[in-house]
Amino acid sequence: MSKLRIAVQKSGRLNEDSMRILKDIGISIDNGKDQLKASARNFPVEVFYLRNGDIPQYLKDGVVDAAIIGENVLIEKGKDIRVAEKLGFSTCRVCIAVPKSVDYKGIEDLEGKRIATSYPNTVNGYLQENNISANLHIINGSVEIAPNIGLADAICDIVSSGSTLFKNNLKEVETILKSEAVLAVSPILSDDKQAILDKIQFRIQSVLKGRQ
Ligand code: PRP
Ligand code: MG
């Protein structure tokens, strides 16, 4: 019998809540994060612990069948991937921020500026919609440090509590999108896997209802 392969974030802000929702729908996973793959004891499911940024491509290729992932990552890297369910946790927004000392008047102030980000597609789309051209510096983490070390004039990254912006003397000036964790589904899915997914989705809906 085939098993549904579900990807979850290996470590980071989504991991804990992702494991909690699996547990709440009755899928108990034996091991911790030490192994990259684990089978559920009582359900035809395998859980893969993967890096956030890799998950959209694995979904596209059908390497995994479904994933618990931030919408922001899908928007950046997996536009054509279907969202089956919004999960209501790990809410954040993707924002542009500039140093607090900057007298920011509007998006035209970003024309010709250097923007550090891990979300180049998202920022580019937003800048294009607004007819702004800027120079992107793509970095994978600690983006908020960039203006302080003279690498960029602005940053674009996710904001949750706002404490990283605050600590780095930055202020949010543009909100590009809002995001939360979602259950995303591979476009390549056999009928028997779809049936397992339907069961999971049904259970998720009851758990989410109970949480309200
Ligand atoms: C994430 C994100 C922001 C921060 C937002 O970084 O890139 O920097 O969290 O959260 P906050 O608004 O609650 O402060 P993370 O700590 O995951 O590290 P990284 O950027 O180095 O990957
Ligand atoms: Mg960060």
Image (cartoon, grey):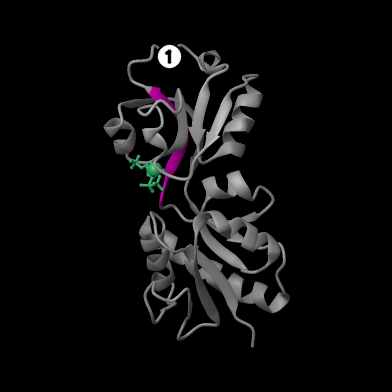
Q: Residue at x 65, y 76 (%)?
A: 193
On screen, residue 139 above or below 36: above
Q: Residue at x 61, y 38 (%)?
A: 121
Magenta span: 90-98
Whether the magenta-drawn stretch holds residue 177 is answered as: no
Residue found at the far left of this picture: 167
On screen, residue 188 above or below 196: above
Q: Residues within 10 Å of mark 1 (few under 14, many from 20)?
A: some
Q: Residue at x 64, y 88 (%)?
A: 1
Q: Nearer the viewer, residue 116 or 70?
A: 116
What secondary structure is the magenta-colored segment mainly? Answer: strand
Number of labels in the image equals 1
Whether the magenta-drawn stretch holds residue 95 is answered as: yes
Tell me residue 9's x, y (percent): 46, 61
On screen, residue 39 above or below 199: below
Q: Nearer the viewer, residue 126 or 168?
A: 168
Q: Nearer the viewer, residue 111 or 4?
A: 111
Tell me residue 209's x, y (percent): 43, 60
Residue annotated with mark 1 = 104
Quarter holding the C terminus?
Answer: bottom left
Q: Nearer the viewer, residue 145 or 89?
A: 145
Tell me residue 33's x, y (percent): 39, 71
Q: Amino acid at mark 1?
A: Tyr
130 to the left or right of 47 = right
Q: Secondary structure at mark 1?
A: loop
Q: Examine the image and state in which quarter residue 132 appears.
A: top right
Tell me residue 27's x, y (percent): 44, 77
